[in-house]
Image (tube, helix red, strand yellow):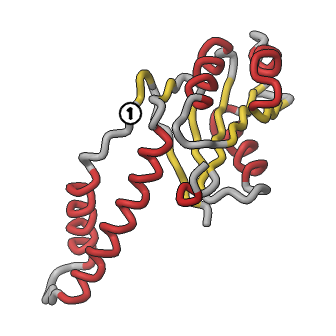
Amino acid sequence: MKDDMRKIGVVICNYNKRDYVLNCIASMLKQSVEADIYVVDNASADGSAEAVRQKYGQQVTLIENKDNLGGSGGFNTGLRRVLQEDYTYIMLMDNDVVADVDAVKHFWRSILMWAWQALKFITWMIRTRYGDMEPISILKNMCKRINTKIGRTVLRYRRSATVSMLLPVR
C-alpha cells in the first residue's frame, strides 16, 4: 500500500447471502489499494460463514455473530472490532456490492477533495460579508458549492443495491 493512502479497514455485513458475500470479497481483494477486510456474518443459515472461511481463509477476518443483529447490529459488531486497530479510514459495505478495482481509491480521493473544497469555501466565507443572511442559508450555499465540485466524482461499481461509505477515523 502506498504511504499516502494510509491504512483502510473494510467491514462487510452479511446475512444468508453466501454467493453475494463471496463475490463482494473477491472484488475487494482485487482493489488497486490495499485494505484489510472484515466480514461480519449475522448467524447465516446458508453456510455463508463456512464458505468465507473455506474460500478466503487468512485473507479476511471473519466475525460470526451468534444471532442475526440486522444490518446496523452487524456493522456495529464490525466497527467495534475495526476501531481496535490503527486504521485511518473504515469502509462499510453491504454484501451485494461488487466494487470496481479502483472503488476504494475513488472513495479516498473523494474524501480528500471534499475536505479541500470545504477548506476553500470556509476561507472564502470568512472573507465575504453576508449581511443579513441566515446561518441556514450560509450552510445551504456551502453544501451546494461543495456538491457542485465533488458531484462529478465517479464512484465506480459494477453492481450495488446499497450505498457504501468510507469514514475517516483519524
| Observer-nearest of 35 and 52 | 35
> Which residue is drawn at the image coordinates 61% and 61% (left, top)?
169
Q: How busy is the neighbourhood of tag 1: few (under 14 within 10 Å), some, or many (20 plus)?
A: some
Which amino acid type corresponds to the residue marked 1 in the rendered image?
A: Arg
Left or right relative to 98: residue 148:
left
Please name whichever residue, 47 or 31, is drawn nearer the observer in this view of the structure: 31
Please state the horizontal and vertical placement of residue 6, each as a whole percent of the image: 60, 57
Q: Nearer the viewer, residue 44 or 154?
A: 154
Q: Is residue 164 above or below residue 133?
A: above
Which residue, as the protein is rendered here, is positioned at the far front?
A: 2
Residue 115 screen position, x and y as percent: 39, 66
Which residue in the protein does label 1 denote? 156
Residue 120, picture quadrant: bottom left
Residue 24 percent location from the top left of the image = 58, 24
> What secondary structure is found at the residue carrying circle 1?
loop
Residue under the point 59% across and 55% down: 89
Name the image quarter holding residue 53.
Answer: top right
Position of residue 105 relative to residue 118, above or below, is: above
- Quarter holding the C terminus is bottom right
The vertical placement of 68 against 72, above or below, is above
The residue lying furthest to the right in this view is 66
Residue beneath the point at 25% across and 87% down: 126
**x, y percent for residue 102:** 45, 37
Left or right of 53, for residue 69: left
Number of numbered tags placed on the structure image? 1
**Residue sitting at 77 percent across and 55 percent down?**
85
